[in-house]
Amino acid sequence: MPEARRLFFALALPKPLQQQVITWRAESFAADAGRPVAAANLHMTLAFLGEISEQKANVLVDIASRIQSPDFSMQLDDLGHWPRPGVVWLGTRRAPTALLQLASLLRSHAARNGCHQSTLPFHPHISLLRSATHPLALPASTPQWTLTAADFGLYESRFHQGCTRYQCLHSWPLVSSAPSSC
């Protein structure tokens, strides 16, 4: 029997933005504030699927391939700390409707296909630090980067040699909202 894989739908951060974020994070937080998320692992989860079989993954890949959702941009202008799970995060104060609809659609399809979904409302964020369980001072503001989402992907979380890495298995374009030229 094939083993289950730990999967999630997410938006990736472009490499230049990854580098800007990790540089800012290193300058803004003490070394003992928490465990930094690797640059290549910075992402915004849209729907967590958990440990699922290859068969269920194939069904969700088929569903995702039929989604026609518009592209969008958002300001990364919010920062917070959830002490209980120990996460310092970067997010947006004004989530675009297209982002909220895409996450809702993916979460509902996941739930209909047997993937447990959190009862908490979707809170778009990028985890910057983990194991940040002690009180810490947050910077007064963020550099307010713009994240432009042109696609979304299905990722696998793999633990190998003491490190967790996220690998994109599939990606799908979002529909351009730019006017077409004649």
Image (cartoon, rainbow, N blue to C red):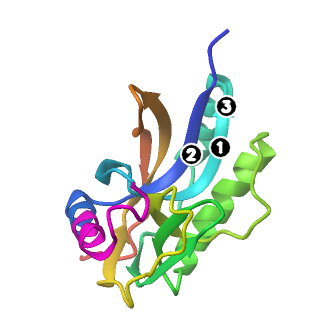
Q: What residue is shown at x 66% (from left), y 64% (from top)?
A: 84
Would you say residue 51 sits in the magenta stretch?
no
Left or right: where 75 falls relative to 132: left
Category of crowding for the residue at label 3, using alpha-carbon neighbours closer than 10 angstroms: few (below 14), some (14–19), many (at least 20) = some
Q: Specify whether 115 is left or right of 37.
A: right
Q: Residue at x 49, y 54 (%)?
A: 10
Q: Secondary structure at mark 2?
A: strand
Q: What amino acid is at disc 1?
A: Leu
Quarter of the image where one finds residue 18 = bottom left
Q: Disc 2 or 3, which lies upstream in sequence?
A: 2
Residue under label 3: 52
Q: Which residues are magenta?
A: 21-36
Instruction: Kindly identify the residue that appears in the image at 44 percent across and 81 percent down.
Output: 137
- Give the number of the disc on residue 8: 2
Tell me which residue sits at (39%, 91%) in the image. Answer: 140
Residue matched to label 1:
49
Residue 90 locus on image (x, y percent): 44, 73
Three-letter residue code for mark 3: Ile
The CA distance from mark 1 to mark 3 is 7 Å
Whether residues under marks 1 and 3 lie with C-beta atoms below 8 angstroms apart, the answer is: yes
